[in-house]
């Protein structure tokens, strides 16, 4: 026992606190001064959830965080967090033997708790009760740091990590909100200027400040683009001489990517019918060339070439580099999709910019095929789906819009990838922002459906049945008689025996374990409903090789009633 106390005392002294038995009896039970965050919890308060974790589990979660998240945004050095775990665990062992459970909310332990919380939500695919308890135990302190207390460089990593936790927990709006505030704190300290950085005397704190600022800059913009909300700092406010985090090539690539993203964002953020008529081919091509040049300049170790020629995803030098290549490539596709998506506004716009329309469709198809490849050959997609669904939903939306507005040209060629994409949606969490946006899109499309002719249909829609079967949705539900499927899940008026129809889920009823499957079903029905509305070219073939009857529309146009579909999909980009 004496040896354990000596170890604990040494550890506590190293951490800058009084040890057990130090000082007089007027202090706390452990002899820790009142100003110390290591304070015994009051009898009526809940025990700090950190006590539910042993040293080995804390270290494991730290390493998991570094592997899955930390490699992208280096706001902390994970080894320093692990070193803190070892010191803290020795203290906890000694306190536990005395039946004491103090709470831990010093700066280093705040970082540890958030790192652990991030790792837990990654491991448990977006929701973790243990992570929620850890966050709850320090939320009041973190909120004070964000909004009330004097700004401090040392607090920036924990606050940036908190924003990351919100994103990983499928709370994109909160992630955007917190990271925006972290960016403002950086501006308040002047970290965006070399004169501000020069005022930070300690070299390690200067490094923390720079890495925190650049990580906040990138993520503030990314989550602004994802949510359709403004980002905080314009590029002209940042000192062009501000040092880059050159030791982290992926982060440097994302900084330059974010600058390009702002240019694209300015072009498409306020997109409307007027702008659709004023799209300038030269401007888009010039910006696309800048994007292509950006990817050429990306460090070779995080660049992906010819993914479709790889038999397996294990050929890259390391697990970390493998994922950095994946994320860089997907973002490369994504920014080009953002650039060209306004062309899909209407049939007229598509026909006026046919080459660019084909380009954005090809990019969307490539994104879906690549995500399918990842899902089939690795566990990377399933591990952190929240990273990948943003790419998936925008790609699905591109294929939908192209097929609706130019069905003759795109509907059959997009069908395979469209359903491939819907297959990947099946595991989508009901809590995620992406899921909620999909449900809003589905709901808005269904609201306008009657006005554009998508009503109950008495005739058999075998094409839709085949499509649902292709997507794996009709398994075990189809009667022995031919099935009739009306768009949007409504029962058909036909007396023919029909496939069992589940009620269409709304935003409230969507919160269920099979949320992704229901989204998949609804999107399939809507897609086939719009395809049925538009018709198919005379003598043409559908995606299954079946000859179709003559269409009601000229081969170069879609129905004028579906030209407003673009606006129902806007937030999916």
Image: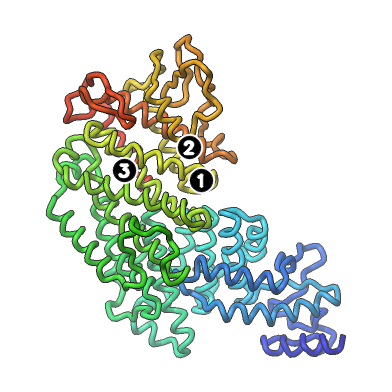
Residues at marks 2 and 1, CA–CA distance in whole angstroms? 9 Å
| Quadrant (top left, top right, bottom left, bottom right) of the N terminus | bottom right
Image point (47%, 74%), residue name: 74
- Which of the two discs, 3 and 2, labels the residue nearer the N terminus? 3
Query: Which residue position is annotated with label 2?
Result: 519
Q: Quadrant of residue 86?
A: bottom right
Query: Which residue position is annotated with label 3?
Result: 398
Q: Residue furthest left?
A: 282
Q: Is residue 559 visible?
A: no
- Which of the two discs, 3 and 1, labels the residue nearer the N terminus? 3
Residue 145 is situated, as x and y percent measured from the top left of the image, at 55, 70
Report if the CB atoms under discs 3 and 2 are less than 8 Å apart. Answer: no
**Secondary structure under badge 1?**
loop
The correct choice, above or below, for 266 with respect to 518 in the image is: below
**How many numbered marks, from 0 up?**
3
Residue 260 is situated, as x and y percent measured from the top left of the image, at 27, 63
The correct choice, above or below, for 176 with respect to 303 in the image is: above
Residue 94 is situated, as x and y percent measured from the top left of the image, at 80, 80
The correct choice, above or below, for 222 with respect to 424 in the image is: below
Sort mark 3 into few (<14), some (14-19) or many (20+) by Cα contacts within 10 Å.
many
């Amino acid at each position: 026992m004496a040896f354990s106390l000596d170890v604990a005392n040494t550890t506590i002294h190293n951490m800058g606190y009084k040890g057990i038995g130090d000082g007089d009896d007027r202090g706390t039970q452990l002899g820790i001064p009142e100003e110390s965050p290591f304070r015994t919890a009051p009898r009526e308060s809940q025990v700090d959830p950190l006590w539910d974790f042993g040293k080995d589990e804390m270290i494991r979660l730290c390493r998991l965080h570094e592997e899955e998240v930390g490699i992208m945004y280096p706001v902390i050095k994970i080894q320093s967090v692990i070193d803190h775990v070892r010191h803290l665990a020795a203290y906890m062992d000694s306190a536990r033997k005395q039946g004491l459970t103090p709470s831990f909310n010093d700066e280093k332990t705040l970082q540890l708790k958030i790192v652990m919380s991030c790792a837990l939500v990654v491991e448990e695919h977006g929701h973790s009760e243990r992570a929620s308890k850890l966050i709850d135990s320090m939320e009041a302190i973190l909120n004070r740091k964000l909004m009330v207390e004097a700004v401090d460089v040392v607090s920036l990593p924990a606050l940036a990590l908190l924003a990351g936790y919100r994103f990983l927990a499928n709370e994109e709006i909160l992630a955007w909100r917190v990271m925006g505030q972290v960016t403002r704190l950086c501006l308040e300290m002047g970290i965006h200027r070399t004169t501000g950085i020069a005022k930070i005397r300690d070299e390690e704190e200067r490094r923390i400040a720079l890495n925190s600022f650049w990580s906040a800059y990138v993520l503030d913009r990314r989550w602004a683009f994802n949510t359709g909300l403004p980002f905080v700092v314009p590029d002209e406010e940042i000192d062009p001489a501000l040092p880059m985090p050159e030791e982290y090539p992926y982060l440097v690539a994302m900084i330059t990517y974010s600058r390009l993203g702002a240019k694209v964002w300015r072009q498409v953020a306020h997109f409307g019918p007027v702008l659709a008529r004023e799209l300038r081919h030269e401007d888009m091509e010039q910006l696309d060339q800048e994007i292509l040049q950006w990817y050429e300049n990306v460090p070779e170790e995080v660049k992906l070439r010819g993914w479709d020629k790889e038999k397996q995803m294990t050929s890259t030098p390391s697990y970390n580099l493998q994922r950095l290549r994946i994320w860089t490539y997907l973002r490369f596709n994504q920014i080009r999709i953002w650039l060209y998506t306004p062309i899909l506004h209407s049939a007229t716009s598509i026909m006026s910019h046919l080459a660019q329309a084909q380009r954005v469709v090809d990019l969307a198809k490539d994104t879906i095929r690549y995500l399918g490849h990842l899902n089939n050959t690795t566990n990377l997609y399933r591990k952190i789906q929240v990273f990948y669904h943003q790419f998936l939903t925008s790609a699905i939306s591109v294929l939908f819009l192209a097929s609706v507005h130019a069905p003759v040209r795109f509907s059959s060629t997009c069908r395979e990838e469209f359903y491939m994409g819907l297959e990947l949606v099946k595991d989508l969490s009901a809590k995620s922002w992406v899921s909620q946006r999909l449900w809003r899109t589905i709901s808005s499309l269904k609201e306008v459906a009657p006005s554009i002719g998508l009503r109950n249909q008495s005739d058999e829609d075998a094409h839709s049945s085949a499509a649902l079967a292709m997507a794996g949705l009709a398994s075990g539900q189809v009667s022995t008689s031919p099935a009739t499927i009306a768009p949007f899940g409504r029962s058909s008026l036909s007396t023919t025996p029909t496939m069992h129809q589940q009620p269409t889920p709304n935003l409230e009823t969507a919160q269920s374990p099979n949320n992704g499957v229901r989204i998949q079903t609804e999107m399939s029905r809507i897609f086939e409903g719009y395809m049925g509305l538009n018709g198919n070219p005379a003598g043409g073939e559908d995606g299954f090789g079946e000859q179709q009857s003559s269409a009601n529309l000229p081969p170069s146009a879609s129905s004028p009633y579906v030209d407003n579909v673009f606006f129902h999909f806007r937030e999916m980009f």
